[in-house]
């Protein structure tokens, strides 16, 4: 029996180049919508001090995966990352383990890849100027994705404080994008706004514009909301995972949307967007995207 490869965060990232990862997620979206990928709702179990263990399996005819991650809010005070975990990939026919990937790296990169698919399919043109609302781990993943797919793009980093935004920009210099620290309103020239916070109250509620795509990523619980009702109700709505969005897309839940009119990522990929309408793409994530990442990693090996 050959030894099982256990990849570090750096090795995991190297196996998930964004062009290939975006294509893998697009293929998985079609498989998931057609029932060729089984991806049940994640199981959440309590840990001490407000922590949780998250279990997210998914299966298809080629591979099966299990993402097992721990979220421990008290780790910041311990000088440790908040999230630890792994994504295990198995052969679907034999059940034999094939690869173990770093869980936080998979999550950050596949989440950014889903956002990039939203931009690819729903933005009126390839963006030259993007605003990221938030200066945390997910913003780091999105900067890397934008640098890989849109080299030279301007990226505004918004944080509650200008000093925090500036510190983020300093840490991410040299990636081939023009980073600019911001605090306050979004620059009117920004063609895409990506919200990447865990805010409990909307942080953006401008009147939607056909020339500006809104992408919501950070709010993943019903009590969270990054986009307010003006932005939501004035936009044509798309979600990456319709089943999960009903329970997790706080922006849409709090705005009381009519779910019958909400379209899917596959609708976006297949061009079923209304011409000339403002658009909002909400991503909540699911294990099908982790399966896509495992496919990508195995293909890059």
Image (cartoon, rainbow, N blue to C red):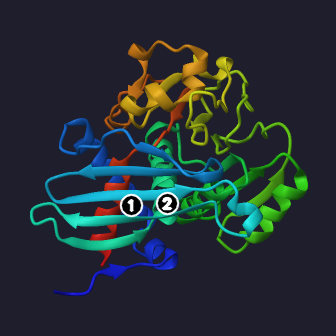
Tell which residue pokes out farthest to the front in this image.
48
Look at 67% across and 33% down and name the residue there. Answer: 226
Q: Is residue 221 left or right of residue 244?
A: right
Give the image location of residue 170, x and y in percent. Answer: 80, 69
Taking depth in this image into account, of 269 and 97 the one nearest to the observer is 97
Q: Is residue 142 left or right of residue 75?
A: left
Taking depth in this image into account, of 48 and 235 the one nearest to the observer is 48
Q: Which residue is mark 2?
A: 109
Q: Are marks 1 and 2 in contact (CB under 8 Å)?
A: yes
Q: Earlier in the sequence, mark 1 or mark 2?
A: 1
Q: Quadrant of residue 220?
A: top right
The C terminus sits in image quarter = bottom left
Residue 180, relative to residue 41: is it above or below? below
The residue tagged with tag 2: helix, strand or loop? helix
Q: Is residue 77 left or right of residue 140?
A: right
User: Which mark's residue is nearer the viewer, 1 or 2?
Assistant: 2
Which label was assigned to residue 21?
Answer: 1
Residue 160, relative to residue 72: is it above or below? above
The N terminus sits in image quarter = bottom left
Residue 153, relative to residue 258: is it above or below? below
Q: Tell me if residue 276 can be seen.
A: no
Look at 28% across and 81% down and name the residue there. Answer: 4
Look at 70% across and 75% down and name the residue there. Answer: 174
Mark 2 Cα within 10 Å, few/some/many (few <14, many 20+)? Answer: many
Q: Tell me if residue 104 can be seen.
A: yes
The residue tagged with tag 1: helix, strand or loop? helix
Give the image location of residue 237, x and y in percent. Answer: 49, 24
């Amino acid at each position: 029996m050959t030894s099982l490869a256990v990849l570090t965060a750096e090795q995991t990232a190297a196996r998930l180049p964004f062009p290939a990862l975006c294509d893998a997620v697009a293929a998985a979206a079609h498989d998931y919508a057609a029932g060729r990928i089984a991806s049940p709702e994640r199981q959440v179990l309590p840990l001490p001090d407000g922590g949780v263990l998250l279990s997210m399996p998914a299966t298809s005819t080629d591979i099966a995966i299990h993402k097992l991650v721990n979220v421990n809010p008290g780790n910041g005070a311990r000088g440790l990352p908040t999230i630890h975990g792994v994504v295990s990939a198995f052969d679907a026919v034999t059940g034999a383990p094939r690869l173990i990937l770093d869980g936080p790296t998979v999550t950050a990169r596949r989440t950014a890849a889903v956002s990039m698919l939203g931009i690819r399919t729903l933005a009126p043109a390839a963006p030259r100027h993007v605003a990221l609302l938030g200066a945390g781990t997910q913003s780091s993943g999105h900067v890397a994705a934008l640098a890989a797919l849109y080299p030279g793009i301007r990226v505004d980093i918004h944080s509650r404080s200008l000093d925090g935004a500036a510190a983020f920009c300093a840490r991410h210099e040299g990636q081939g994008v023009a980073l600019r620290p911001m605090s306050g309103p979004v620059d009117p020239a920004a063609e895409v706004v990506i919200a990447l916070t865990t805010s409990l109250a909307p942080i953006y509620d401008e009147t939607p514009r056909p020339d500006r795509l809104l992408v919501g990523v950070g709010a993943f619980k019903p009590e969270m909301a990054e986009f307010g009702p003006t932005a939501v109700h004035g936009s044509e709505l798309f979600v990456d995972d319709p089943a999960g969005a009903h329970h997790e897309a706080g922006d849409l839940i709090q705005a009381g949307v009519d779910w019958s009119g909400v379209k899917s990522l596959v609708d976006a990929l297949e061009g079923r967007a209304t011409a000339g309408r403002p658009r909002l793409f909400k991503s909540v994530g699911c294990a099908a995207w982790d399966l896509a990442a495992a496919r990508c990693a195995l293909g890059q090996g």
